[in-house]
Image (cartoon, rainbow, N blue to C red):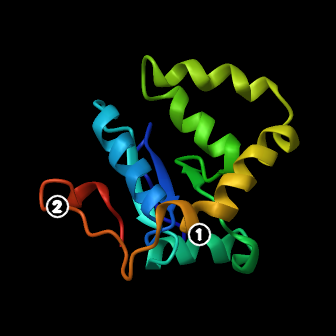
Amino acid sequence: MLPILPEGTQLILFDGVCNLCNSSVQYVLGKDTKQRFLFTSLQGETGQAILAHFKVDVAKMDSIILYTSDKKIFYKSTAALKIASRLGFPTNLLTPFLILPAGLRNIVYDYIARNRYAWYGKKEACYIPTPQLKARFLP
């Protein structure tokens, strides 16, 4: 079953064992002063339900996914840039890259995604939020 998000919020699905992904979540948490984003790991219950609903091939999934309150999903560089667009200055300066074709943007995205474990490492378990941040994370 798909989660129902509060109006104006979006859900970021991330690789919970990836150090780069976890650092990115920490960055978004620090910049998201209006608390527009919620989070869940791709490995978690909510993440798995969304992947199943949209028939995402998990064998090929090495991407961040952005799930919106109107039940749409965005992948890879499109998801990253849409997130950046809502984080304020200077991160939102990346938004104009959305005018480039996704295939072109994703060449760079896929290269980083393929190498993220080798470059940044991997955790044994998913990220566990602090008690202060727990409300922003779905199971």
Give 70 or 97, whichever is nearer the viewer: 97
Give 80 or 135, whichever is nearer the viewer: 80
Residue bearing the label numbered 1: 50
The image position of residue 47, as x and y in percent, is 51, 71
> Going by the image, does 57 lie left or right of 115?
right
The image position of residue 90, as x and y in percent, is 45, 18
Say which of marks 2 and 1 sits in front: 2
Residue occupying image coordinates x 75% and y 44%? 108
Residue occupying image coordinates x 70% and y 48%? 109
Give 115 or 139, whichever is nearer the viewer: 115
Residue bearing the label numbered 2: 130
Q: Residues within 10 Å of mark 1 (few under 14, many from 20)?
A: many
The image position of residue 8, as x and y in percent, is 44, 36
As drawn, the residue found furthest toward the left would be: 131
- Of the 4 image quadrants, the one containing the N terminus is bottom right
> Going by the image, does 134 lie left or right of 137?
left
As drawn, the residue found furthest toward the front would be: 119
Residue occupying image coordinates x 39% and y 75%? 123
Q: Quadrant of residue 16?
A: bottom left
Q: What amino acid does circle 2 point to?
A: Thr
Which of the two discs, 2 and 1, labels the residue nearer the N terminus?
1
**What kind of element bears circle 1?**
helix
Q: Residues within 10 Å of mark 2 (few under 14, many from 20)?
A: few
Q: What amino acid does circle 1 point to?
A: Ile
